[in-house]
Amino acid sequence: MKPIRILCLVIIFISNNLMAQNIPVDRPNIVWIMLEDWGLDLGCYGTKGIETPVTDQLATEGMRYTNAFCTSPVCSTSRSAMITGFHQNYIGAEQHRTAKEDRKSLPYGIKPMPLLLQEAGYFTALMLYNKTDANFKGDLGFMGKDWKEREKGQPFFAQITLGGTHRQWNRDAKNPIDPNDIELPPYYVDTPFARRDWANGLEQMQICDREIGDILKRLDKEGLSENTLVFLIGDNGRCHIRGKQFLYDPGLQVPLIIKWPGKVAPNQVIEDMVQTIDITATILEVAGAKPKHPLQGKNLFEEASKNREYIFAARDRMGGTHDAMRTIRSKKYKLIHNLMPERAWLQYSGYKEDMYPMLAEMNVMYMEGKLNKDQAKFFAPNKPEFELYDIEKDPYELNNLAYDLHYGDIKDKLLAELYNWREQIKDKGVSQDFREGGLSSKYPTRTLEEWKERYETWKPWVFREPKSKEKHPFVKKDY
């Protein structure tokens, strides 16, 4: 038999075998760029003071989602959900940074996404910042540290985490930001210290924007851009007071930008409410990987992900800090159920107290009676069981309507839907041992003098020059 005929038969056999498995013959490479602890503070989302030309250009080349939310406002629980396609409570991964000896295997025959992709013929790489943060045990399915390790012609999946936006934050010597050019949310004090801290975070994102540019340039240089599906997201919301660790929009809302040349039309702005586990479902579908257990996310390229009425999220233990919250959000309303209302929002957390300079300044001002009504709310010694917000009228989530009789029907409907979702994800809620455990819930966590001392210690770090060698005053480990 002639060599050309043999080659044709081999190609036909491979193609038929792939089609029989419902696996696309021409599958794209997939690059998932993940920003640590970053919300919508980008130029393309209208943030003042920041310049992110690479990300802004990426958004014009594909789809930019304005209502994308993670399932939990902290890295390990959010990432556990994303790497599987299931809400973290459903797979027993809801407690942040579960100790290794307490981690359990995934239930119901669920496999992590990279392992499913590997089984479908993809090379899977975990690149740059080597972080997975899964709250369960077992093989995640990553095969290498760079897509260059793959076999010739093999499609690849690369998860690339940019760790810079995780606190501490570096100053941007190339393009420093004037604090007068930024805009602070109204629940923060408007002081030179707060403005500089906020601007420092934006400068770090500018550095990450250039790193994103390096990734995209490499794809171009290697001739991979035209057949590569690119996702850009944050793993959870912004690391500021009232952001990360909490169920307000700044803790849950993340950027979501998708580029796929020839498949995704440019200049799309999508207002549909979506969740980060939808990205998992999308990737597996595009790659032709078939999970045995039905995913809880939806393929973003199919109608099932559009016109979603609600998104849901949960917060449980954060390190040694015990608390539990659940939320349901429509485009207009959000209901938060605080399962442990007896505890302060700002009960002791080593992460927040060692990483958030603004927390020290605002604690001093709170204890001196210098915060206004909206700024002081979050510093209360306990919280209401329910919070209901009209997101359209009150985007900063400051006016709690949960105890307004005019909104009783809305609250009841949302609470019923929330309870139904909690049943679906097998939510265990709060045990008595959990309620009584954890670090001290005493509030305030420090005396006024102690907070003043901490505030003064922060100042050289916050106001450091872009090329300063000033050391972070508190951090001793990666939170």
Image (cartoon, rainbow, N blue to C red):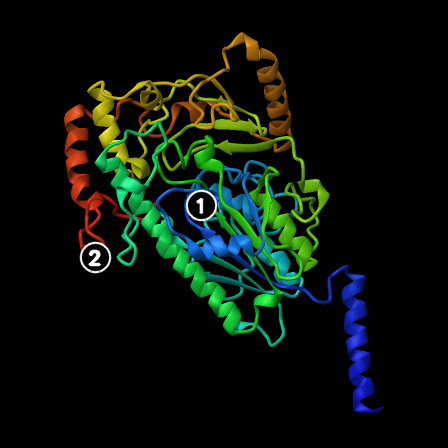
Asked whether, in this view, residue 447 is left or right of residue 299, the answer is left
Asked whether, in this view, residue 106 is left or right of residue 317, the answer is right
- SS state under label 1: helix
Name the spot of residue 47 as percent of width and height, x first. Answer: 41, 42
Q: Quadrant of residue 332?
A: top right
Label 1 Cα crowd, 10 Å radius (few <14 / some 14-19 / many 20+): few
Structural distance between the alpha carbons of marks 1 and 2:
42 Å
Q: Does residue 167 appear in the picture of this structure?
A: no
Question: At label 2, which amino acid type do we have?
Answer: Lys
Asked whether, in this view, residue 149 is left or right of residue 460, the answer is right
Of the numbered discs 1 and 2, the one sitting upstream in the chain is: 1
Label 2 Cα crowd, 10 Å radius (few <14 / some 14-19 / many 20+): few
- SS state under label 2: loop
Where residue 467 is drawn, which disc sits there?
Answer: 2
Residue drawn at x 43%, y 55% as measured from the top left: 53
Residue drawn at x 62%, y 71% as measured from the top left: 154
Of 100 and 442, nearer the camera is 442
Where residue 101 is drawn, which disc sits there?
Answer: 1
Looking at the image, residue 469 lies above or below residue 462:
below
